[in-house]
Amino acid sequence: KMAATMKGPVAVEDVNVTFEDQQKINKFARNTSRMTELKNEIESKKKSLQNLQDASDDLMMFDDDALLIPYQIGDVFISHTQEETQEMLEAAKEALEQEVKALEERVSAIQQVLGDLKVQLYAKFGNNINLEADES
């Protein structure tokens, strides 16, 4: 959880929080929250990738070409040959890897925005503002 909070009682004459400052603080909070969501999504997709890899590895152990393997598509299982199933697993893995890559690029873009905002906010508020993530 991320908190962009003002530390302690700040005398108004010390630091004047303008509307623009408030906008920046809000933008920082929104982006931090979005980044957390994206990171959770990445974790979830990486778990799915690992499951696909495990299934693919298990499939390699079969040496019976006549074996039909049920593959879930939506709510139904459709049986395919080992080779077809392997190809479908590979395609699913590639698609997931692309999604993870895209999400990681978005995280990286948000980190850039947060970095810029941090510089601006710390420059103005110094120790009166806390923009570090709570590790709770």
Image (tube, rainbow, N blue to C red):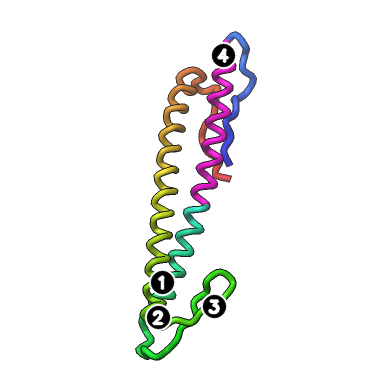
Q: Are marks 4 and 3 in contact (CB under 8 Å)?
A: no
Q: Secondary structure at mark 3?
A: strand
- Residue indicated by mark 4: 15
What is the crowding at mark 4: few (fewer than 14 residues within 10 Å), some, or many (at least 20)?
few
- Name the residue nearer the viewer: 61 or 15: 61
Residue shown at 44% from the left, 64% from the top: 49
Where are the magenta residues, as a range?
A: 14-40
Q: Are marks 2 and 3 in contact (CB under 8 Å)?
A: no
Q: Secondary structure at mark 1?
A: helix
Mark 4 and mark 2: Cα distance apart in space? 64 Å
- Name the residue nearer the viewer: 37 or 92: 92
Q: Nearer the viewer, mark 2 or mark 3?
A: 3
What is the crowding at mark 3: few (fewer than 14 residues within 10 Å), some, or many (at least 20)?
few
Which mark is on residue 88? Answer: 1
Main SS class of the magenta portion in the image:
helix
Mark 2 and mark 1: Cα distance apart in space? 12 Å
Mark 4 and mark 1: Cα distance apart in space? 59 Å
- Residue indicated by mark 3: 77
Question: Residue 2's spot in the image, x, y percent?
Answer: 57, 38
Q: Nearer the viewer, mark 4 or mark 2?
A: 2
Q: Nearer the viewer, mark 2 or mark 1?
A: 1
Question: Residue 92's spot in the image, x, y percent?
Answer: 42, 66
Residue shown at 56% from the left, 14% from the top: 15
Earlier sequence position, callout 4 versus callout 1: 4
Residue type at mark 2 is Leu
Which mark is on residue 59? Answer: 2
Query: In the rendered image, which quarter contains the N terminus?
Result: top right
Q: Secondary structure at mark 2?
A: helix
